[in-house]
Image (spheres, rainbow, N blue to C red):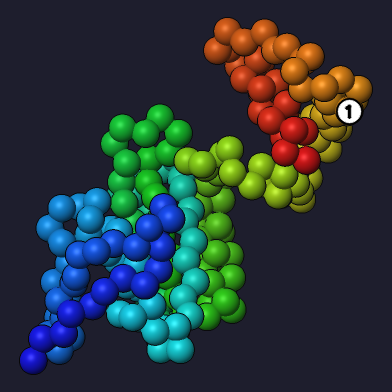
Amino acid sequence: MSQLLWGTQKVDGRVSTFPVVRVANVVALPGVPKFCERAFDELQDQLFPVEERQSMFFDTIYTDLDEFDFSRRLADVAARFEEQNVQIGSYPELKNKFFKTKLTIETESAESMEAVRIALKELLVGHIVYYDSHAWTDTVAKWRAFKKRELVEAKNVDFVRKLEEAEKIVEDIVERYPLDQIALSFNGGKDCTVLLHLLRLKVDE
C-alpha cells in the first residue's frame, strides 16, 4: 500500500506542492537533483522522526601524507575501535594543493570520537593539515581555536604575540572609524590576504 507524503517545512519561505511516494520502507523522491534535495529537506522529520534518530558524531582530519604512507597503521587504529562502532574513511585528494588525504570519523559516542581523534593525531603527528573549506563562517571561534592550537600544540608563543599585535591595530581602526570609511588595498598577495581575514574577523566580532 502506497502513501503520499506532502512537505510541511518551508524552504525559501515556501512549501512544495509535489508529493513524494512511500511504499513500506521505500521512498521515491523526485529525480531532478534540486527537487530531490528540497523534498528531503521538507520531509526529513516525517521520514526520520527526531525521537528515532541515533545521535552521531562526525569529524574530518586532513593530512599532507599520501594514504599509502600510513594505510597499514590506519587499519590498526580502525581495528582498535571496531567494537565501539567507529567508522574511519580514507579518501585521497589528487587536485587539492593543501592536503593529500582526507580522513572521516563517524561514531555514536563523544568519548569514542575523542579517543579516535587522539589516536589519529598521534598517527599523523607533524603531518596534519588544518584545512577549512568554509573559512568565512564562525570566524571568531575558529580564530580563537587556531591561536590556542598554536600555543598549546606548536608552542609558537612569539607568533601568537605578533598576531595579537596585528589584531589590536585592526581592532582600533574598526572601533575608531565607520566601516564605510575604511579602505583596504588588496592585490591578492599573501600579506593583504591575511589583512583581509583580520578585518573580516574584527567586523564579525
Q: Name the spot of residue 12 as percent of width and height, x first.
A: 41, 52
Crowdedness of circle 1 by 10 Å Cα count: few (<14), some, many (20+)?
Answer: few
Q: Count the marks.
A: 1
Q: Label 1 belongs to which residue?
A: 175
Q: Name the spot of residue 137 as percent of width and height, x first.
A: 59, 44
Up the image or down, 129 lies above or below 176; here it is below
Between 41 and 54, the one nearer to me in the picture: 41
Q: Quadrant of the C terminus?
A: top right
**Quadrant in the rendering for residue 48:** bottom left
Specify the amino acid type for callout 1.
Answer: Glu
Up the image or down, 139 lies above or below 110; here it is above
**Quadrant in the rendering for residue 18:** bottom left
Determine the residue positioned at 10% across, 86% down: 2
Which secondary structure lies at badge 1?
helix
Q: Horizontal placement of 109 versus 77: left or right?
A: right
Q: Name the spot of residue 75 as percent of width and height, x first.
A: 35, 67
Between 52 and 188, the one nearer to me in the picture: 52
Determine the residue positioned at 80% across, 35% down: 160
Q: Horizontal placement of 131 versus 2: left or right?
A: right
Residue 158 in sight:
no
Determine the residue positioned at 32% across, 41% down: 93
Between 204 and 192, the one nearer to me in the picture: 204
Q: Name the spot of residue 105 as percent of width and height, x first.
A: 43, 65
Up the image or down, 135 lies above or below 76; here it is above
Residue 100 in sight:
yes
Determine the residue positioned at 45% across, 34% down: 98
